[in-house]
Amino acid sequence: MHPYAVDSDERKKVTSILVVLSIILILAAQRVLTHFAIPLPWFICIPSPFVVLGLLWLLFDRYLWKFSILHSIGLIKTPDLSGEWHGNLQSSHDEYHTLHLISLKINQNWTSISLFLDTDVSSSQSEVASIYINNPMGPVVNYLYLNDPNPKTPETMHIHRGTTTLRYDASKDTLEGSYYTDGKRKNYGEIRLKRGK
């Protein structure tokens, strides 16, 4: 997985909240121990706020950001795109005559992501990505990929890079958009995907 950019200030807000929360938790733990006169063994100490912040960050990055309540109150705007997506691709390579079946696997945390796309002739993996949240038409995922053809593909097909842009429709749980390849291949096409169950 690699980091991805978002056009939202949510990461600044959440970081500030987690810093304050870690300090509150440490102070609360100290007060409880003092109030009830609970002695700690010599080999146990209250962790520093930095340790607590690190643990909170890890929990939030992997799990907590997905909670629907955080999305409904507007604290988190980044969509959770994790999962298996299935659909089709049409390419300028054959003048859009063939409907190629494809699958896209997205692994996503709050700050990192990876996208793996498989077709009948090749597979590709994201290298850089961003999610444009403040798009009036819905969130848009942009990513640069490295494509690796299967061993049995024609010699004319070689390892290449390209870019994919997909718009996320939350109401239909679909990703639709386009791709284009680097200057050597100069192909482009359309992609339609729906998240599997």
Image (cartoon, grey):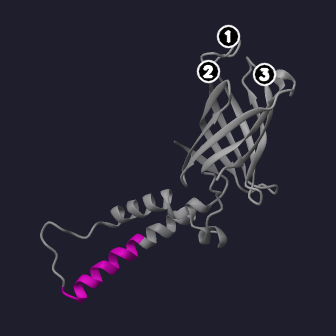
Q: Residues within 10 Å of mark 2 (few under 14, many from 20)?
A: some
Q: Residue furthest top?
A: 155
Residue receiving disc 2: 150
Q: Are marks 3 and 1 in contact (CB under 8 Å)?
A: no
Residue in view at x 57 percent, y 67 percent = 67
Q: Residue furthest left?
A: 42
Report the amino acid beneath label 1: Glu
Find out whether residue 34 is within the magenta segment.
Answer: yes
Tell me the SS state at disc 3.
Answer: loop
In this rendered view, identify the residue nearer to me: 138 or 190.
190
Where 185 sits versus 100, above or below? Answer: above
Which mark sits nearer the N-terminus, 2 or 3? Answer: 2
Residue 44 percent across, percent down from the top left: 18, 68
In this rendered view, identify the residue nearer to me: 33 or 64.
64
Q: Which residues are magenta?
A: 22-37
Residue 64 percent across, percent down from the top left: 51, 64
Which mark sits nearer the N-terminus, 3 or 1? Answer: 1
State the image quarter where residue 156 is shown: top right
Residue 117 percent across, percent down from the top left: 64, 35
Residue receiving disc 3: 186
* Horizontal relation, residue 1 to residue 184: left or right: left
Q: Residue 196 has which mark?
A: none
Residue receiving disc 1: 155
Residue 15 percent across, percent down from the top left: 50, 63
Which mark sits nearer the N-terminus, 1 or 2? Answer: 2
How many angstroms separate mark 1 from mark 2 (CA)?
10 Å
Report the amino acid beneath label 2: Asn
Residue in view at x 61 percent, y 42 percent = 105
Does the magenta stretch mainly form a helix, a strand or a loop?
helix
How many angstroms separate mark 3 from mark 1 (CA)?
16 Å
